Amino acid sequence: MIRSDQILKTVSMIQKEHLDLRTATMGINLLDCRCGNVKKTCAAVEKKIRNYARNLVKVADEIGEEYGIQVVNKRISITPLAHVCAGFDAKGYVAVAKAIDRAADAVGVNF
């Protein structure tokens, strides 16, 4: 059971100390996007990130508004690229990184 002193302490932190949630993070496994072709891998990675994270910022903002606590950063955590890009040359890694950047920009995440 929540005590009244705990509620008052939380309200005080929000009002006086500007309590916020630092980060909302979505984890996305990209291993199933990997194929032997760089172009197809890039397309699959970008599509999956856009699809899964399309509402991340909106939902984090709505939750923050509902509880009166700002969610400062919205970010995505992905499978290490060394696993997704295994066997690709440097240009392949760069292409996949650019696809990730495009997807991140499209969904509006901070990181």
Image: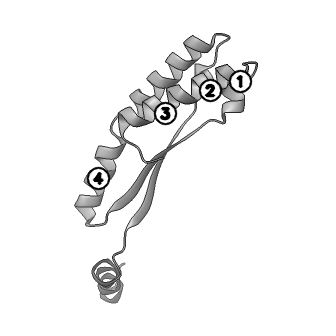
99 or 65, nearer to the observer:
99
Q: What is the crowding at mark 1: few (fewer than 14 residues within 10 Å), some, or many (at least 20)?
A: few
Horizontally, residue 14 falls left or right of residue 90, namely left
* Picture disc at residue 94: 2
Q: Position of residue 75 (x, y in %)?
A: 46, 47
Mark 4 belongs to which amino acid? Asp
- Which of discs 1 and 4 lies nearer the camera? The answer is 1
- Kindly report the distance in space between the C-alpha atoms of the residues bearing marks 1 and 4: 37 Å
Residue at the extreme bottom: 5
Horizontally, residue 32 falls left or right of residue 62, namely right
Question: Badge 4 is on which residue?
Answer: 61
Q: What is the crowding at mark 3: few (fewer than 14 residues within 10 Å), some, or many (at least 20)?
A: some
Q: Position of residue 1 (x, y in %)?
A: 37, 78
Tags 3 and 1 in contact by the CB under 8 Å rule?
no
Mark 3 belongs to which amino acid? Asp
33 or 72, nearer to the observer:
72
Q: Position of residue 56 (x, y in %)?
A: 36, 42
Q: Identify the mark nearer the N-term, 2 or 3.
A: 2
Name which quarter of the figure residue 85 lies in. top right
Question: Badge 1 is on which residue?
Answer: 90
Mark 1 belongs to which amino acid? Ala
Question: Badge 3 is on which residue?
Answer: 101
